[in-house]
Image (spheres, rainbow, N blue to C red):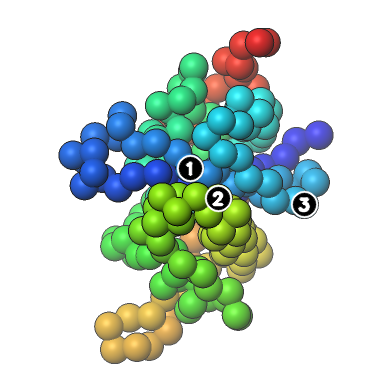
Amino acid sequence: MSYEIVFDIETQNTFAEVNNDFKKLKISVVSIYRSDTDSYESFTESELSRLWPILEKSSRIIGFNSEHFDVPVLNNYYLGDLTQLPHLDIMKEVKNSLGIRLKLSSIAEATLDNVTKSADGLQAIRWWKEGKIDEIKKYCEQDVRVTKELYDFGVTNKQLFYKNLTGEILPFAVNFSKPEKPVNASGAPANANINYTLPF
């Protein structure tokens, strides 16, 4: 059965701590939503081997700023190249429509009822240093939930909303429909049903 994955990651460290080197960013938690099971699940750094087959078998992965952040960081751990998976980056679609980048929380507050981010990435890093993994999972899954709700709203209504500089809430068009031929993070044709996971 075909399914989509909405995902988000949290890291153990900041860009400042690794001198802006993506290769040195380490994952604390990855959270996903699976459309086939209508369920959420989180994976720690040591559990990523269980995540790869789930991503590989999905019809599309969906994130927010995932092309420039989540996927490159995940690729530090993956044997293949996750940029080749069918991919929708909602932030990229927002920028294509509006010409500007917006935060997930800003779009969610303008578009959705009672759905907001519960913390921020810096808090998640503090939790990591304090060993509060369950708190990171709750936060990351909430971000996935917000991303999923925005995605669902955009699919149904072909638009999202944002608040302009004067505080007016305005709509803008989005197109989250699946292309006839899946595209990867860079917009090139994607490799469907790839499998780079080794059986050990």
Disc 3 secondary structure class: loop
Q: Position of residue 93 (x, y in %)?
A: 43, 54
The one nearer the camera, 83 or 13, is 13
Mark number, residue 28: 1
For the residue labelled by badge 2, is the local secondary structure a helix, a strand or a loop?
Answer: helix
Q: Position of residue 159 (x, y in %)?
A: 52, 68
Residue found at the very far front of the displayed protein: 130
Q: Residue at x 60, y 80 (%)?
A: 114
Disc 2 vs disc 3: Cβ atoms closer than 8 Å? no
Asked if one can make out residue 139 in the rendered structure from this viewpoint, the answer is yes
The amino acid type of the residue labelled 1 equals: Ser
Secondary structure of the residue carrying numbered label 1: strand
- Per the model, the C-alpha gap separating discs 1 and 2 is 8 Å
First in sequence, mark 1 or 2: give its number: 1
Q: Is residue 199 above or below residue 89?
A: above
- CA distance for labels 3 and 1: 23 Å
Q: Residue at x 32, y 61 (%)?
A: 101
Asked if residue 195 lies left or right of residue 101, the reply is: right
**In the image shown, does 114 or 4 lie closer to the viewer?**
114
Q: Amino acid at mark 3?
A: Asp
Name the residue furthest top.
199
Could you classify mark 2 by the number of other residues whose Cα lies within 10 Å: few (under 14), some (14-19), or many (20 or more)? some
The residue that disc 3 covers is: 38
Q: Residues within 10 Å of mark 3 (few under 14, many from 20)?
A: few
Q: Quadrant of residue 199?
A: top right
Q: Which mark is residue 133?
A: 2
Image marks 1 and 2: residues in contact by CB distance under 8 Å: yes
Label 1 neighbour load within 10 Å: few <14, some 14-19, many 20+: many
